[in-house]
């Protein structure tokens, strides 16, 4: 998988904390490249290109699940940490 903004390099360019992630979704229409997806945080949107459709779907599903597991729910005016729940 490559990050678009870094010239399609497959070398690691940094780390994004799942706690900072807001959304992950396909982005072929935005970048005009097959197997592209975007990962958005409050401050930025990053675009990545997978090698195959299945790999793109696997990344989106895995990151999406991680975002949900690390988010919090407000239930009855209490904040419940999702990490304390079993998935």
Image (cartoon, rainbow, N blue to C red):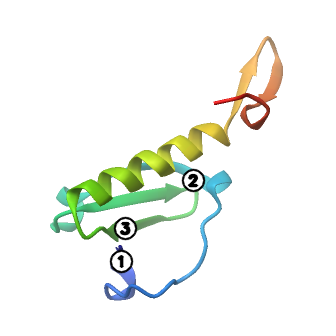
Which residue does the numbered mark 3 point to in the structure image? 47
33 versus 37 height, above or below: below
Q: Quick one: SS at disc 1?
A: strand
Nearest to viewer (mark 3 / mark 1): 1
Across and down, in percent, residue 15 comes to: 61, 73
Q: Residue at x 60, y 66 (%)?
A: 16
Locate residue 7: give its quadrant.
bottom left
Q: Residue at x 31, y 50 (%)?
A: 57
Quadrant where the image shows the C terminus = top right
**Real-space Cα separation, disc 2 to disc 1, in angstroms:** 18 Å
Q: Residue at x 51, y 83 (%)?
A: 12
Is mark 3 in CB contact (under 8 Å) with mark 1? no
Which residue does the numbered mark 2 point to in the structure image? 21
Relative side of 43 to 46, left or right: right
Q: Quick one: SS at disc 3?
A: strand
- Determine crowd level at label 3: few under 14, some 14-19, many 20+ residues with C-alpha closer than 10 A: many
Q: Nearer the viewer, residue 53 or 16?
A: 53
């Amino acid at each position: 998988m490559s990050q678009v903004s870094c010239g399609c390099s497959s070398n690691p360019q940094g780390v994004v904390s799942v706690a900072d992630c807001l959304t992950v979704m396909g982005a072929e229409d935005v970048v005009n490249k097959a197997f592209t997806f975007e990962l958005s945080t409050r401050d930025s949107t990053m675009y990545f290109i997978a090698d195959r459709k299945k790999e793109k779907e696997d990344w989106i599903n895995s990151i999406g699940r991680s975002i949900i597991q690390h988010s919090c729910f407000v239930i009855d005016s209490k904040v419940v940490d999702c990490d304390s729940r079993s998935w």
